[in-house]
Amino acid sequence: MMQKFTLQAKSMQKKSLRDRAISPRYQKSVSNFTAKPLSILCVFGMTLALSELGINPAYALKKAVTEETAINIAQPVVNTNSAPTSAQTSQSTDALLQKAEHLFDQGRYQDALAQYQQALNIYRQQGDRLGEAITLTWIGAVQIGLRQEKQALNTLLEANLILQRGLQNSTNSDKQLYRKAEGENQYQFGRAYLNLEEYANGLKILENSLAIRKEVGDRYREGKTLTGIAIYHVKKFDFPKALEYLDQALKINQAEKNQAAEAQNLFFLASVYGILGQKDKALAFTQQSAIAYQSLGNLLGQANVLNLEANILSLSLEYTKVVQLNLKALELARQAGDRDLEAEQLNAVAVSYRNLNEYPKAIEFLLQAEKVYQALGDRAGEARNLKNIAEIRLAQGQNREALALYSQAKTIYQDLTNVPNPKPSDRQTLASILVDEGSLYTVLSQYPKAISTLQEARSLYQSVGDKFGEGVAAMYLAGVYLQLGETAKVAEVLKLLPSLTKTSPQLQQMGQILLTMFSNNSDSSNPQSQLNSALSLLEFFKQSGNRATEAGMLSQIGALYFELKQPDKAIAAHQQALEIYRAIGDLSGVGNSFYNLGLVYALSNQSDRAFTAFQTAIQFFRAIGNRNQESKLIANLGLLVQRQYPELAIAFYKQSVNVTESIRKELRVLDIAQQKSYQQTVAANYRTLADLLLQKGRVMEALQVLDLLKVQELQDYLQNVKGNERTAQGIYIFPEEDLQTKAIASQPLKSLQTLIDGNQKIAQQLSKIPQSELNQVPEYLQKLPQGHALLYPLILGDRLELILFIPNKTPIHRSVAIKEVDITQLVVDFKIGLRDPDSLDVIEPATKLYNLLIKPIEADLTNTNTILYSPDGLLRYVPISALYDGKQWLVEKYRVNNLISYSLSDFTPKPAKPLRIFAGAFGGAQNTTKFGQIGLPATVTEVQSISEALPNTTKLVANDFSRKATESQMQNKNIVHLATHAEFNSGKPEDSFLIFGNGDKVLLSEMKDLPMSNVDLIVLSACQTGVGKLGNGIEVLGFGYQVQRAGAKAAIASLWQVSDEGTQALMQAFYNDVKKGDRSKAESLRQAQIATIRSKDFSHPYYWSAFILISNGL
């Protein structure tokens, strides 16, 4: 985010009126030396605002105010009082100027302007032309502060004419004062021209100001002019030159004790070092600048320093700190009464929340910003706001909505640039919107539109001479050509990039983006084409001198060579990458290179070399604190030894799982490429560990691993699961396991005998441990109530494993030989049968599933009345209440409560409270569509029935049933019933949603933010899961977790949409049972399902088994 810079200075001491009149204290407290915005680049999934950190676009893009609102300086201020005496006049002007100085230093420009206008009136009455010229110069400075640069030019010109006449007519002693005043006047002229993006004029006039300062020995004011020239060089991306001028200015300002100018100086230094990626230097200068502004009492300066610090920290992904800094800056902007800065700070806060994936909060602040922009009449601000909203919609997977918002923002900027001599910055912003739009077209596979849009962006950047922006557009074009496999065009674009970006310090980020784009496209079905593109990219990186991205590209090339079954070339590429990473001191890169070498060795049957490579990689990742990679590598050691040394493999896998669980609370959001790799690896490790433990009869440990597997699968899906103290404990590691694995992992492998000895020692220790101790029940499971049983199935390639835990018993393990593909077909057949109420075809798959899941443990369930069921994979689509034993349905024998994860569940009883129910209905007419969904007229009858059965019910239907109204009702209700469309699909959480009667939506990813802390039960009576491709049912688990995280104790959801009549019958039976008040929610659902089974019209499981209870219904 770009910022406002602060330019202000106080006089060192009291001086004569005329001497003080040209003091640099009369600079603006927040400078509008603004820079053209650079393009926004997306690196590893994070957004980097590669603009001049610390320059606010509101000030770069803001139009000059209209003539109607301009201050008419030419007219003297009318004083209605009688003319003052000479002594009174002198005292009055002194007091006015002192007050104006104080107000100016605080950034209170309108108040300062009033004082200056009064002083101007007095000077004119006295006929003091020098005083008049100086005061006009100050007023011009204030107008620049108020972003009225065109008016400022007129005011400064009027002052300059007076000064020129004075220089011609004055004596030598007076000429010195006139010349000093001219130096200040020229400085303010330069500022105005830079803000108006007339850079050549601005530089020329600033250089003239500097020459005058030196001529008259005005050292005190020389520093700020040097800073102005530095800003020019920032705009031209000549950062070394900018630093040269800033360093000169700082020495002068410190020597002259010009605190305000020094504060501004420090701020600019921090900004430039931030651009250059030198975080420590940048932060050091922000701290110094902050102290200076605090001592001056300048709220705007303090706000901008906070914002700059936030921007610097955002580059290192410290988003929690960034939010707090931006919120403080927002408060200061509001205290200062600066609405422009307030709007930009609202945007900054929103972007911070977006980076934390807290999208509802981000939207909330953007909507506030929108109101401010509209009040200011700032169309450019509105457009930038639309762009930010679009980016959030894009992050939520709402690509079409994002595209529409980009289009709106583009239209506004097309209007702003469709004028004679448009601002270069407006053309650049339009180009950046086109880049975003073009990249989205690429995501939507609309490649012709992507190419034409990006080419238009590139042309716009060319028209304003922005080589860096042109390079960005060209880079995204290369990304499109990568998608299309047009390697010749990729190479053609890449040849241009070094010349376009040679003056930019952001070349490394651009290269990193290309590398990321290549990585995200690396799952292409044509690895040879990918290799050709990779080799072109490698040449580009070599030419650019970017060794880090050269090494990263070599790693990609190594992976492609291996995919093409050329392991020798793969090893050579990874070794080249390793050498580069070592040379540049990149420990993470070194660790990844050993990791990649280990994978190639392992898959080439070179286990000993693979083991050594993994060992080495572990040491590097431990050294840099990368525990995610450490966890994966320890698991890889287990993978290498699991066939021959299972006890040792178990120990390695346990170590790996425990590392993962220990960091879950602080697990950061991974970028897309990392997510893909991490998810595929970690969940598989949990499954392998459970498999190995079951093979060795270590059932309780396996049960705990399976429970943690649910947590890991939720994390893979939602990316927001942080676990708790219980999950952080992981799996108990026996002393010998810990000793052997740590010793082997940390020491070079001298021979296979080392592994054999380690495995034997672990096996010997475990053989001495009694079975009861080996399967000792952890404390949290000891609290399971009598009559309850935990059932954990695990689907493996050739069998189904069942783990049953019943209080006061040894955990039970049963294994059923069946192929995974056969389980899948059985589930599909069952789903088809369940959804056909006119057929009894469901009986056969229901019986087979009963024999598969329940029959092997049937005898163990003798004293059980409640099954706490934690299904695996696509078994989540199976309502086990509808399993059939040949005589009756399972629900007729047991209550069923679907678990998210026992570790994440809270079964602490809540005190019974009087029922307070909220019921909302989608409504709509039969056979019509509403907000893209079919009408559900029976939902109105459904909620009406609930309100009649339970008097303390609030109901809302159709348009009254909005998200806002629902959230308001949720806060004081303990049952929430939503009779509306909801879809939970496999894939991304953003693909799953609930829709309200007025068309509002809440995504699955947002449900954690709903205010349900007082809700005991939320019911979705018309939802469906697995609508598209049949996945692993994680969306069902995800819904339960999200509402639990929002505060709800339990949820009832339907796995498919049941007929209106069937739903109404079951819900009526359910709420009739609930109002008795003496049963658990699970039992009430069971009784309602039994009542429906025994009814005449709804006995088929289609009508009653769709409804499952998730989480704690006890």
Image: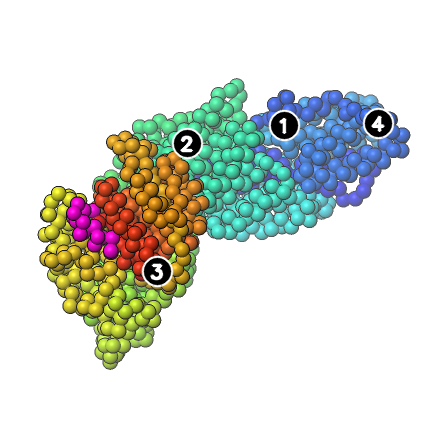
Front disc: 2 or 4: 4
Q: Is residue 387 above or below residue 1019?
A: above
The Cα atoms of the two marked residues, 2 and 4, are separated by 57 Å
Name the residue at 34% across, 66% down: 730
Three-letter amino acid code at the position of disc 4: Asn
Residue 71 in the image, given as x and y percentages of width and height: 68, 25
The reply to whether the C-beta atoms of the residues labelled 2 and 1 are less than 8 Å apart is: no
Three-letter amino acid code at the position of disc 3: Leu
Three-letter amino acid code at the position of disc 2: Tyr
The reply to whether the C-beta atoms of the residues labelled 2 and 4 are less than 8 Å apart is: no
The Cα atoms of the two marked residues, 1 and 4, are separated by 33 Å
Q: Quadrant of residue 867?
A: bottom left
Name the residue at 30% across, 75% down: 736
Residue 45 in the image, given as x and y percentages of width and height: 39, 45
As helix, strand or loop, the secondary structure at mark 1 comes to helix
Task: Provide the residue designation for mark 1.
Answer: 149
Front disc: 2 or 1: 2
Q: Would you call the spot at circle 1 few (<14 residues within 10 Å), some (14-19), or many (20 or more)?
A: many
Task: Provide the residue designation for mark 3.
Answer: 904
The reply to whether the C-beta atoms of the residues labelled 3 and 2 are less than 8 Å apart is: no
The reply to whether the C-beta atoms of the residues labelled 1 and 4 are less than 8 Å apart is: no
Question: Which segment is the magenta one?
Answer: 1086-1103
The Cα atoms of the two marked residues, 4 and 3, are separated by 77 Å
**712 relative to 890 in the view: left or right:** right
Say the numbered circle drawn on residue 81: 4
First in sequence: mark 1 vs mark 4: 4
Task: Provide the residue designation for mark 2.
Answer: 406
